[in-house]
Image: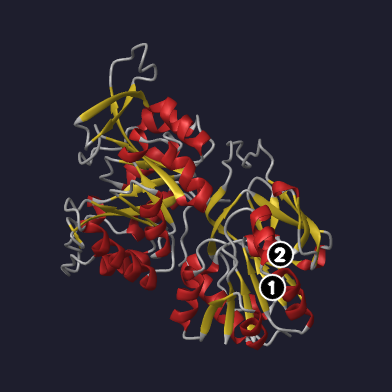
């Protein structure tokens, strides 16, 4: 069973629909018992870091995520679910879970493409991810595949090794991270067509090693 | 680098698409779910549904469509038409839409934008704008005026001012429709698109007038649009999304080519 963490963070049903479509049993829950019974955890997120951390604390999920991580359970963070894994987010000046070293920063206000065009914030739409190594969750995703992003903040891992995928938007930023039994992506695999479903499928089959 | 998005728009009345039914292979489809699947597989980057049902019992029918679409396609889609309250927005988003668009209702009650952005996040709230070219006046300094009711009612509001105001209120994106170009298939309103797109920080989807791939090239380049809405040119089978993207790519526009 795959637990999709429910902490009032936007549209969880789209993640569930995608996992249902792939044929893996899953449920949306914030019950600690259900999460402990699950053999995988998806940690989605839409919205602001401040509110997300507030909800996680209220529900006691902030310690539960750490516990499941330490127990070796495969965890997939998505969007804000990636961001709050780090130490700190500039969004609402939020201290976060601190499972991954580093911080989450806002895109610079004046950000330009290589050709000098003024780029818009949020970074919204389809963009490519350059996967750096052969992680099981990102295996067999065709080169050049694009994924759907919506965000104004990006992760800056303190340790380069954590970054397993990068994306270019006026700058090169980390769009996928991996650490032991944890993977997290800044984009929305559940809204990224076949390559996104491919990543979800890989995660659903991953044993965390 | 971010790709420019190509977005088919489906008008839905009483749970059926109103136009756009004959594809090149002569398959006739009036089912919005099947059309969404078709465009998803053809490489659409996003899909816009516009509910034009007039009757008051419309909501359950459209919500049923939204739920079925959400189970079928795994790309973002938005739903607009008749969204007046926070509850309308919530229903559509919970049914599985990524975004919800407000148009006339936001002109009449701008606070709906702020409420929606606060409750669900700006990324969910699209402002639909219907705009008409008018002589420049003190009141309409940009020469573009907001209209509602399909262009029948002029609002005395400057379109550029409204776009910036909506951004300030929390709109995450603008779908900019030129009433003058809409349905003509003679090209987008480039001047209007450029004016709005270069004066807001949020993405702008150009709408109205698409007839050929060249029109999309023009609006994405000269018009500085972030995305282009298309309807008849693909619904009636004159072009496929794949052909449009190939043309844009050959002409130096970054589009998503693998799906």
Between label 1 and label 2, give the one nearer the viewer.
2
Which of the 4 image quarters holds residue A206? bottom right
Colour scheme shown:
secondary structure
The image shows residue A184 at horizontal and vertical percentages of 67, 69
Q: Number of marks in the image?
A: 2
Mark 1 residue element? strand
Query: Looking at the image, is A56 positioned above or below residue A51?
Result: below
User: Residue A57 — which label?
Assistant: 2
Give percent across and percent down for residue A37.
Answer: 64, 88
| Camera-nearest residue between A7 and B255 | A7
Q: Residues within 10 Å of mark 1 (few under 14, many from 20)?
A: many
Per the rendering, the mark at residue A183 is 1
Q: Residues within 10 Å of mark 2 (few under 14, many from 20)?
A: some
Q: Nearer the viewer, residue A201 or A113?
A: A201
Disc 1 from disc 2: Cα separation = 22 Å
Q: Nearer the viewer, residue B254 or B95?
A: B95
User: Could you say where residue B94 lies in the image, as x and y percent from the top left?
Assistant: 42, 63
Mark drawn on residue A131: none
**Residue at image x 36%, y 44%?**
B102
Which quadrant of the structure image shows residue A65? bottom right
């Amino acid at each position: 069973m795959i637990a999709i963490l429910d902490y009032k963070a936007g549209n969880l049903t789209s993640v569930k629909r995608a996992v249902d479509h792939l044929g893996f049993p899953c449920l949306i829950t914030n019950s600690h018992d259900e999460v402990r019974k699950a053999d995988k955890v998806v940690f989605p997120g839409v919205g602001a870091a401040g509110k997300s951390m507030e909800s996680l604390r209220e529900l006691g999920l902030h310690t539960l995520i750490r516990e499941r991580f330490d127990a070796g359970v495969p965890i997939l963070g998505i969007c804000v679910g990636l961001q709050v894994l780090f130490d700190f987010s500039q969004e609402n000046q939020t201290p976060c879970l601190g499972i991954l070293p580093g911080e989450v920063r806002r895109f610079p206000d004046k950000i330009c493409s290589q050709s000098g065009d003024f780029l818009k914030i949020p970074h919204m739409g389809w963009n490519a991810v350059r996967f750096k190594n052969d992680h099981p969750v990102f295996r067999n995703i065709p080169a050049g595949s694009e994924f759907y992003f919506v965000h104004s903040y990006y992760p800056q891992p303190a340790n380069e090794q954590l970054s397993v995928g990068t994306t270019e938007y006026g700058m090169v930023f980390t769009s996928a991270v991996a650490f032991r039994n944890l993977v997290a992506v800044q984009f929305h695999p559940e809204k990224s067509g076949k390559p996104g479903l491919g990543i979800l499928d890989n995660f659903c089959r991953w044993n965390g090693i | 680098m971010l790709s420019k998005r190509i977005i088919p728009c489906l008008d839905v009345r009483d749970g059926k698409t109103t136009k756009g039914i004959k594809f090149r292979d002569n398959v006739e489809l009036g089912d919005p779910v099947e059309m969404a699947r078709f465009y998803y597989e053809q490489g659409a980057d996003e899909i816009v549904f516009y509910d034009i049902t007039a009757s008051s019992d419309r909501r359950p029918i459209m919500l049923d469509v939204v739920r079925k679409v959400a189970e079928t396609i795994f790309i973002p889609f938005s739903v607009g038409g008749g969204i007046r309250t926070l509850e309308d927005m919530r229903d559509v988003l919970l049914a599985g839409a990524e975004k919800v668009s407000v148009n006339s209702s936001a002109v009449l009650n701008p606070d709906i934008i702020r409420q929606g952005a606060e409750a669900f996040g700006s990324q969910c709230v699209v402002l639909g704008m219907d705009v008409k070219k008018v002589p420049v006046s003190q009141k309409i300094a940009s020469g573009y005026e907001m209209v509602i009711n399909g262009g029948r009612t002029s609002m005395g509001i400057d379109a550029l001012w409204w776009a910036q105001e909506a951004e300030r209120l929390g709109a995450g994106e603008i779908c900019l429709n030129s009433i003058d170009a809409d349905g003509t298939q003679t090209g987008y309103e480039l001047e209007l698109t450029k004016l709005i797109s270069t004066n807001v920080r949020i993405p702008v989807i150009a709408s109205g007038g698409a007839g050929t791939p060249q029109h999309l090239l023009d609006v994405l380049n000269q018009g500085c649009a972030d995305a282009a809405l298309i309807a008849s040119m693909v619904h009636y089978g004159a072009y496929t999304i794949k052909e449009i993207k190939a043309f844009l790519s050959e002409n130096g526009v970054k589009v998503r080519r693998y799906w």
